Amino acid sequence: MNIEELNKRKTPVVIIDDSLDKYKDLPLFQEKVDKANEMLRTVGLPKANKKKTRHA
Amino acid sequence: MQLDRYPLKAEESLMVFEFISNGPKGQIPKLVKFSETNLKDVYNLAFGDKDLTTGDLNDLAISNNGDSEKVLATVVSTVYAFYDRYPNSYIYATGSTKARTRLYRIGITKYLNEITKEYYVYGLRNSEWEIFEKEIEYEAFLAKRKNSNFII
Protein backbone atom coordinates (compact mmCIF):
# COMPACT_ATOMS: atom_id res chain seq x y z
CA MET A 1 0.00 0.00 0.00
CA ASN A 2 1.47 3.37 -0.99
CA ILE A 3 1.14 6.72 0.78
CA GLU A 4 -1.73 7.85 -1.42
CA GLU A 5 -3.71 4.69 -0.70
CA LEU A 6 -2.98 5.00 3.01
CA ASN A 7 -4.25 8.58 2.99
CA LYS A 8 -7.50 7.47 1.33
CA ARG A 9 -8.32 4.98 4.07
CA LYS A 10 -11.01 6.02 6.51
CA THR A 11 -9.07 4.48 9.35
CA PRO A 12 -6.15 6.82 9.88
CA VAL A 13 -2.53 5.98 10.33
CA VAL A 14 -1.82 6.58 14.00
CA ILE A 15 1.63 7.04 15.47
CA ILE A 16 1.92 5.61 18.96
CA ASP A 17 3.33 8.18 21.36
CA ASP A 18 3.94 7.00 24.92
CA SER A 19 4.07 10.58 26.17
CA LEU A 20 0.26 10.59 25.87
CA ASP A 21 -0.02 7.81 28.45
CA LYS A 22 -0.29 10.39 31.21
CA TYR A 23 -3.66 11.56 29.88
CA LYS A 24 -5.23 8.13 29.91
CA ASP A 25 -5.99 8.02 33.61
CA LEU A 26 -6.47 11.73 34.16
CA PRO A 27 -10.08 12.82 34.63
CA LEU A 28 -10.06 14.92 31.47
CA PHE A 29 -13.32 16.52 30.40
CA GLN A 30 -14.78 15.05 33.59
CA GLU A 31 -17.74 17.42 33.57
CA LYS A 32 -18.77 16.05 30.19
CA VAL A 33 -18.31 12.48 31.35
CA ASP A 34 -20.45 13.19 34.41
CA LYS A 35 -23.16 14.67 32.22
CA ALA A 36 -22.96 11.68 29.89
CA ASN A 37 -23.30 9.32 32.86
CA GLU A 38 -26.33 11.19 34.13
CA MET A 39 -27.93 11.15 30.70
CA LEU A 40 -27.19 7.47 30.17
CA ARG A 41 -28.54 6.66 33.64
CA THR A 42 -31.88 8.28 32.86
CA VAL A 43 -32.19 7.52 29.16
CA GLY A 44 -30.14 4.37 28.72
CA LEU A 45 -29.31 3.08 25.27
CA PRO A 46 -31.58 2.90 22.21
CA LYS A 47 -34.46 0.61 23.09
CA ALA A 48 -34.39 -1.47 19.95
CA ASN A 49 -30.92 -2.66 20.83
CA LYS A 50 -30.77 -6.39 21.30
CA LYS A 51 -28.21 -9.11 21.09
CA LYS A 52 -27.92 -11.15 17.96
CA THR A 53 -29.25 -14.67 18.47
CA ARG A 54 -27.77 -17.77 16.97
CA HIS A 55 -30.00 -20.24 15.15
CA ALA A 56 -29.23 -23.93 15.21
CA MET B 1 -15.70 10.81 1.20
CA GLN B 2 -12.14 11.58 2.15
CA LEU B 3 -11.65 14.89 3.89
CA ASP B 4 -8.33 16.45 4.57
CA ARG B 5 -7.28 15.67 8.14
CA TYR B 6 -4.32 16.11 10.45
CA PRO B 7 -1.79 13.38 11.34
CA LEU B 8 -2.64 11.62 14.58
CA LYS B 9 -0.70 10.40 17.55
CA ALA B 10 -2.17 8.19 20.27
CA GLU B 11 -1.16 6.21 23.29
CA GLU B 12 -1.18 2.44 23.08
CA SER B 13 -4.81 1.85 24.06
CA LEU B 14 -6.12 4.31 21.43
CA MET B 15 -8.22 6.14 23.99
CA VAL B 16 -6.24 9.37 23.87
CA PHE B 17 -5.29 11.03 20.58
CA GLU B 18 -3.41 14.20 19.83
CA PHE B 19 -3.11 16.29 16.70
CA ILE B 20 -1.95 19.78 15.83
CA SER B 21 -4.28 22.30 14.25
CA ASN B 22 -2.36 24.52 11.88
CA GLY B 23 -3.76 27.84 10.70
CA PRO B 24 -3.57 31.63 10.86
CA LYS B 25 -3.48 31.54 14.66
CA GLY B 26 -0.52 29.20 14.61
CA GLN B 27 -0.20 25.64 15.82
CA ILE B 28 -2.79 24.57 18.37
CA PRO B 29 -2.47 21.12 19.93
CA LYS B 30 -5.78 19.28 20.30
CA LEU B 31 -6.50 16.29 22.46
CA VAL B 32 -9.29 13.76 21.86
CA LYS B 33 -10.27 11.44 24.68
CA PHE B 34 -12.59 8.45 24.77
CA SER B 35 -13.59 8.03 28.42
CA GLU B 36 -15.33 5.05 29.94
CA THR B 37 -18.80 5.77 31.26
CA ASN B 38 -20.79 3.92 33.90
CA LEU B 39 -22.31 1.77 31.17
CA LYS B 40 -20.19 -1.07 29.89
CA ASP B 41 -18.82 -0.51 26.39
CA VAL B 42 -20.14 3.04 26.23
CA TYR B 43 -17.51 5.74 25.85
CA ASN B 44 -17.77 9.49 26.00
CA LEU B 45 -15.97 11.32 23.22
CA ALA B 46 -14.58 14.75 24.08
CA PHE B 47 -11.92 16.97 22.61
CA GLY B 48 -10.38 20.32 23.27
CA ASP B 49 -7.33 22.54 23.03
CA LYS B 50 -4.23 21.75 25.01
CA ASP B 51 -2.51 24.67 26.71
CA LEU B 52 1.18 24.17 26.08
CA THR B 53 2.27 26.14 29.14
CA THR B 54 -0.04 24.58 31.73
CA GLY B 55 -0.95 21.31 30.02
CA ASP B 56 -4.59 22.06 30.83
CA LEU B 57 -7.35 21.22 28.39
CA ASN B 58 -10.11 23.53 27.31
CA ASP B 59 -13.17 22.22 25.51
CA LEU B 60 -14.73 25.69 25.40
CA ALA B 61 -11.93 27.34 23.45
CA ILE B 62 -12.84 28.89 20.12
CA SER B 63 -9.59 28.73 18.21
CA ASN B 64 -10.75 30.41 15.00
CA ASN B 65 -7.84 28.78 13.25
CA GLY B 66 -9.74 28.57 9.98
CA ASP B 67 -9.71 24.79 9.90
CA SER B 68 -12.87 23.70 11.73
CA GLU B 69 -13.83 21.22 9.00
CA LYS B 70 -10.37 19.65 9.00
CA VAL B 71 -10.42 19.48 12.81
CA LEU B 72 -13.84 17.79 12.77
CA ALA B 73 -12.70 15.36 10.06
CA THR B 74 -9.66 14.50 12.18
CA VAL B 75 -11.82 13.87 15.24
CA VAL B 76 -14.07 11.64 13.10
CA SER B 77 -10.98 9.72 11.97
CA THR B 78 -10.18 8.99 15.63
CA VAL B 79 -13.63 7.34 15.81
CA TYR B 80 -12.66 5.02 12.96
CA ALA B 81 -9.40 4.16 14.73
CA PHE B 82 -11.18 3.64 18.05
CA TYR B 83 -13.76 1.31 16.50
CA ASP B 84 -11.03 -0.78 14.93
CA ARG B 85 -9.83 -1.50 18.47
CA TYR B 86 -13.21 -1.52 20.25
CA PRO B 87 -15.71 -2.68 17.60
CA ASN B 88 -18.58 -3.42 20.00
CA SER B 89 -18.62 -0.09 21.75
CA TYR B 90 -21.00 2.81 21.68
CA ILE B 91 -19.66 6.33 21.41
CA TYR B 92 -21.58 9.11 23.11
CA ALA B 93 -20.88 12.73 22.19
CA THR B 94 -22.30 16.13 22.81
CA GLY B 95 -20.98 19.65 22.40
CA SER B 96 -19.73 21.68 25.33
CA THR B 97 -22.22 24.37 24.30
CA LYS B 98 -25.47 24.36 22.35
CA ALA B 99 -23.70 26.07 19.47
CA ARG B 100 -21.07 23.37 19.37
CA THR B 101 -23.65 20.59 19.55
CA ARG B 102 -25.31 22.27 16.57
CA LEU B 103 -21.96 22.31 14.78
CA TYR B 104 -21.58 18.57 15.36
CA ARG B 105 -25.12 18.03 14.08
CA ILE B 106 -24.30 19.96 10.92
CA GLY B 107 -21.14 17.91 10.49
CA ILE B 108 -23.02 14.61 10.89
CA THR B 109 -25.77 15.82 8.55
CA LYS B 110 -23.27 16.73 5.87
CA TYR B 111 -21.86 13.21 5.69
CA LEU B 112 -24.85 11.25 6.95
CA ASN B 113 -25.17 9.02 3.89
CA GLU B 114 -21.54 8.03 4.16
CA ILE B 115 -21.57 7.57 7.93
CA THR B 116 -24.70 5.41 7.98
CA LYS B 117 -23.11 2.88 5.64
CA GLU B 118 -21.01 1.76 8.57
CA TYR B 119 -22.60 3.19 11.70
CA TYR B 120 -25.92 3.49 13.40
CA VAL B 121 -26.29 7.10 14.45
CA TYR B 122 -28.80 8.24 17.05
CA GLY B 123 -29.82 11.64 18.30
CA LEU B 124 -31.15 12.34 21.77
CA ARG B 125 -34.38 14.32 21.79
CA ASN B 126 -37.02 14.65 24.50
CA SER B 127 -35.14 12.11 26.63
CA GLU B 128 -35.29 9.42 23.96
CA TRP B 129 -32.85 8.10 21.43
CA GLU B 130 -34.07 8.19 17.88
CA ILE B 131 -32.46 7.44 14.55
CA PHE B 132 -30.60 10.58 13.52
CA GLU B 133 -32.47 12.65 10.99
CA LYS B 134 -31.50 15.82 9.22
CA GLU B 135 -32.97 19.17 10.31
CA ILE B 136 -33.71 18.04 13.86
CA GLU B 137 -32.04 19.52 16.92
CA TYR B 138 -30.52 16.94 19.28
CA GLU B 139 -29.00 17.19 22.73
CA ALA B 140 -26.45 14.44 22.19
CA PHE B 141 -25.40 11.78 19.73
CA LEU B 142 -24.67 8.08 19.94
CA ALA B 143 -22.87 5.93 17.39
CA LYS B 144 -22.52 2.18 17.03
CA ARG B 145 -20.67 0.27 14.36
CA LYS B 146 -22.95 -1.92 12.25
CA ASN B 147 -20.79 -5.00 11.91
CA SER B 148 -20.46 -5.59 15.62
CA ASN B 149 -21.98 -8.40 17.71
CA PHE B 150 -25.26 -6.58 18.07
CA ILE B 151 -28.12 -5.83 15.75
CA ILE B 152 -30.32 -2.84 16.22
Image (cartoon, coloured by chain):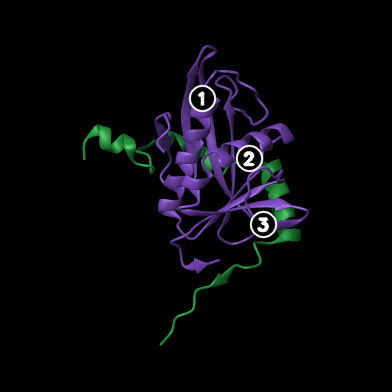
Q: Nearer the viewer, mark 3 or mark 1?
A: 3
Which amino acid type is marked by label 3? Answer: Glu
Q: Give residue A14's quadrant in the image.
A: top left
Q: Which chain is green?
A: A
| Among numbered discs 2 and 1, the one appearing first in the sequence | 1
Respond whether the residues carrying marks 3 and 1 are from the same subunit.
Answer: yes
Q: Nearer the viewer, mark 2 or mark 1?
A: 2
Mark 3 neighbour density, 10 Å: few (under 14) some (14–19) many (20 or more) = some
Residue B3 position in % (x across, y down): 43, 32
Mark-to-mark CA distance, 3 and 1? 34 Å
Residue B35 image offset from top left, x and y in percent? 58, 48
Quadrant for the N terminus of chain B in the image:
top left
The answer for how far apart the CA atoms under marks 3 and 2 are is 14 Å
Residue B109 appears in view? yes
Marks 3 and 1, the one that precedes in the sequence: 1
The residue carrying mark 1 is B29
Marks 2 and 1 sit apart, C-alpha to C-alpha, by: 24 Å
Q: Chain of mark 3?
A: B
Give the percent coordinates (x, y) of residue B63: 60, 20
B18 versus B35 height, above or below = above
> The residue marked by circle 2 belongs to what chain?
B
Question: Disc 1 residue type?
Answer: Pro
The C terminus of chain B, quarter of image: bottom right
**Residue under the image location 65 percent in, 61 percent down:** A45
Q: Quadrant of residue B127?
A: bottom right
Q: Nearer the viewer, residue B48 or A56?
A: A56
- What's the mark number on residue B130? 3
